[in-house]
Amino acid sequence: MKKLLFFIFFILIVNNTSLGAYGNLQPPLIVIDPGHGGIDPGTIHSNLLEKEINLKASLYLKQFLEKSGALVILTRDNDTDLAKLYPGPGARHFKDVFNRKKYIENLNPDLFISIHVNAGEFKKKNFGQVFYGRNPKSLAPAEFIQNKLNEIYKVSKAPQIADFLILTASTPGVLVEIGFIDDQRLCDNDFLKNLCQQLASSILNSLNNKGPTSRVKFEPKLLIIIDDFGNNSDNWHEFLKLDLPFTAAVMPFLNNTQKEAKILAQAGKDIIIHLPMEPKKYKRSWLGPKPVMVNLSEKEITTLLTEALKENTRAIGMNNHTGSKACENKKVVQTILSFCQKNNLIFIDSQTTPNSLFPLLGSEYGVVVLKRDIFLEINGKDEKKILQQIFQLQKIAKEKGLGIAIGHVGFEGGIPTVKALKAALPPLQAQGAKFCTLRDIVKKHP
Ligand SMILES: [Zn+2]
Ligand SMILES: [Zn+2]
């Protein structure tokens, strides 16, 4: 009996020690997802492979989190990918990330952290960047981790919301770009270890609600984008009369592109480039003079994008006009993302195909990619049906924290869209709906 009591006592002590700071409290369950693996190296710089740094950092992070009593599970602990974890359709890369998301959702952790390293040549000033999904519980960890990375790299960056595939998981989570692949310090074990130790403490602090940023409010926001400006549609002025902070997507290379962009910007609208991209089925007249076609070379696409931005320097981002074919093309998507990275542009995926590669590849370039949730005129140009869609957007915003809708100037929308928006604004605002600009949602880098 004495022996048994001692044994129980011993177990209690051991358990208490292993619980670390948590004592009798439930320790948090944290999933760490080392990005890439197996045949997918991630981004590469000379002989440095992102997948290897991700795994090493994840193992350090696990060690420090466990020391503090957290329960930690890795999505991979060796050089492999998860494409075959669950059966299902899709290309290997898509399935790899989709399965990580599913795996995380099945574990239902308090937080998941996807570890990545940014591509690109950022020799001048390195930094870490945190992205968070639309789950309101992701915001506090994102703020905490970003603040810590800012201390380490001596910069002041804001964490960014993004609809990267992994971040669409239903559980709270962040994707952390711990640095740039061409930063030699990431090969230094002491530097990496120290970075992970600091990240671990910021993660635990965020979960324990320690510090001012844990009280950051996550308000449901509505973002309305109006497509197809630049075409001199006879109803485009009507949108300017709306007391609504919409984002104007202006098509490039048209006679009225510069004029409309200028007037819309003067009216305080955020401007993005409405980039025509090759669809699967189309009439050539839909695409304007210079669309992004899949048979263009990377250089030709970059030249085209450079010209479009030169013509419309106010643009803070892009979204695609059509593009069901080009958005599924890896070369095209990577070229556009690389351009967005270099020019600090946001990309909004109009979702003209559910298989668009932007949400999958955006994290590789550290580019904010957001996804359109609904089209306003999906059920036709009937004012009442458009009104229904606007109320649907409010519902999405309440559920997900952010709702993104695309409406149209010109033939596809126009006056019925303006009328529906005018009718919907007072009741929605009375219900507390917050219509936002793109700048409200995506904090521009200082
Ligand atoms: Zn990566
Ligand atoms: Zn369009």
Image: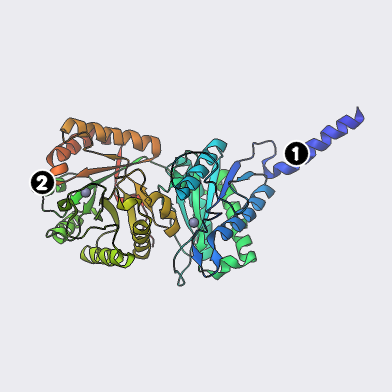
> Is label 1 in a helix, a strand or a loop?
helix
> Is label 2 in a helix, a strand or a loop?
loop
Q: Nearer the viewer, residue 50 or 139?
A: 50
Q: Image quadrant for the N terminus?
A: top right
Of all residues shown, which one is farthest toward the right?
2
Q: Is residue 138 visible?
A: yes
Write down the residue under mark 1.
Answer: 15
Tell me if residue 341 comes above or below residue 163 in the rendering: below
Q: Image quadrant for the C terminus?
A: bottom left
Residue 162 is left or right of residue 284, and the answer is: right
Q: CA distance from mark 2 to mark 1?
A: 70 Å
Circle 2: residue type: Asn
Residue 224: image location, x then y, percent: 26, 44
Q: Which mark is residue 127?
A: none
Tell me if residue 249 comes above or below residue 27 in the rendering: below
Neighbour class for label 1 at 10 Å: few (<14), some, many (≥20)?
Answer: few
Mark 2 and mark 1 lie on one chain; the one further toward the N terminus is: 1
Residue at (38%, 59%) from the top-left corner? Answer: 334
Task: Judge: label 1 CB < 8 Å from ligand 1.
Answer: no
Residue 388: image location, x then y, percent: 24, 31
Tell me if residue 44 comes above or below residue 134 in the rendering: below
Of all residues shown, which one is farthest toward the top?
1
Of all residues shown, which one is farthest toward the bottom?
124
Write down the residue under mark 2.
Answer: 235
Q: Nearer the viewer, residue 388 or 231?
A: 231
Q: Nearer the viewer, residue 299 or 273?
A: 299
